[in-house]
Image: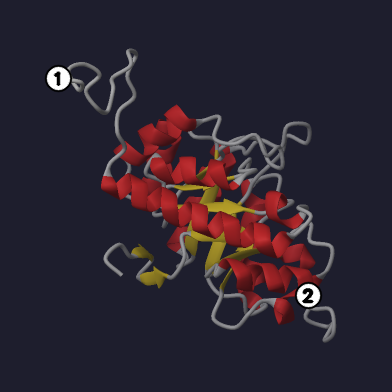
Amino acid sequence: MNDPLIIAGTQIRSRFFLGTGKFSSYPLMRDSIEASGAHVVTVALRRIDPTQEQENILGFIPKGCLVMVNTSGARNAEEAVRIAHLGRAMGCGPWVKIEVIADQRYLLPDNAETIKAARQLASEGFVVMPYMNPDLSDAKRLQDAGVASVMPLGAPIGTNKGVLTRDMIRILVESLNVPVIVDAGIGRPSHAAEAMELGAAAVLSNTAVAVSPDPAATARAFALAVEAGRLAYRAGISPSRDNPEASSPLTGFLH
C-alpha cells in the first residue's frame, strides 16, 4: 500500500506481469493467472478469436485483469501500429506492448522501428509499453515519444537465462523517469527477484511459467519472488566486499 505502481494513471495491483503463450490449455493458463495474482496480462492479438465462444482466450482471463495486447509477429513499425489498432477495435483497450522483431534467429527487438511505432501510438492515446534492447539512448527516445514504460530484455526470448543485461537495466532504472519493466529471459523466481533488486518496477514472464511441470505453483513462486525483490530494493541491499568480515568478534570471547 505504501509502494504503489502507477502506470498511465492506473494503480497496478501486482508487480508480476504474466504472458499467456505456450500454456498447454486455457484452463491451466487461467489457474496460473489466479495463483500469481497478476493484474497485467499480455495477449498476442493473433491468439484472440472473438467468433469462438468456447475457446476464446479472453474468456479464460480472470475478471479484473488488465489485458495488454502485444504486437507479436510485427516485423516493422507499420505492422505493429496495425496490430495495435486491431486490438483496440476488438475491444481490448488502449494498453499495448510493442514488440517489433525482424530478426528471426535471435528474436531480438528492433529498437529503431519500435521507436517509430511508439511515437505514433502514443500520439493516438495508446498506453505504450515497448519491448526493447536495453540501450540508454533509445530508452530516452522512447521516453520522449511518450511511452508509459520501457520493457528491456533480461535475456533473449524464451532462453530462461536470467538477467544477463543487469548492468544496462541498472543504468535505465537510474536514468529514466518512466517505469522499467524487465521482460524476456526470466527463467526462475530468483531471476525475477534479482531484477527487482536492481530497481525494476515490475517483471514479466511467460515461458518459464507456462512450460513448468506445475505452472500455477510456479506462477505463485514468481509473484512472491517479485514481492521479495522489491522489498529488498526498498530496504537497501548490503554492498558486497572483496574481503571477509565477521558478523561477531572472533577474539577475546574466552576472557
Query: Residue 255's mark?
Result: 1
Alpha-carbon distance for marks 2 and 1?
66 Å
Residue 1 shows up from this direction = yes
- Point out the residue furthest to the front here: 255
State which quarter of the image contains the C terminus. top left
Give residue 161's quadrant in the image.
top right
- Element type at mark 2: helix
Residue in front for this viewpoint, 234 or 140: 234
Residue in front for this viewpoint, 34 or 247: 247
| Three-letter amino acid code of the residue under disc 1 | His
Give residue 60's quadrant in the image.
bottom right
Locate residue 188, reporting x and y percent: 62, 44
**Tag 1 or tag 2, which sits nearer the N-term?**
2
Looking at the picture, does residue 191 appear above or below residue 254? below
255 left or right, relative to 113: left
- Point out the residue furthest to the left here: 255
Circle 2 packing at 10 Å, graded few (<14), some (14-19), many (20+), is some
Mark 2 vs mark 1, foreground winner is 1
Locate residue 52, reporting x and y percent: 85, 82
| Three-letter amino acid code of the residue under disc 2 | Pro
- Which residue shows up at 53% across the image and 59% down it? 223
State which quarter of the image contains the N terminus. bottom left
Looking at the picture, does residue 229 appear above or below residue 248? below
Locate residue 138, reporting x and y percent: 45, 36
Circle 1 packing at 10 Å, graded few (<14), some (14-19), many (20+), is few
- Which residue shows up at 72% across the image and 65% down it? 45
The residue to which callout 2 is attached is 27
Residue in front for this viewpoint, 78 or 28: 28
Locate residue 116, reporting x and y percent: 53, 46
Looking at the picture, does residue 121 appear above or below residue 250? below
Query: Residue 65's mark?
Result: none
- Which residue shows up at 67% across the image and 54% down it? 206
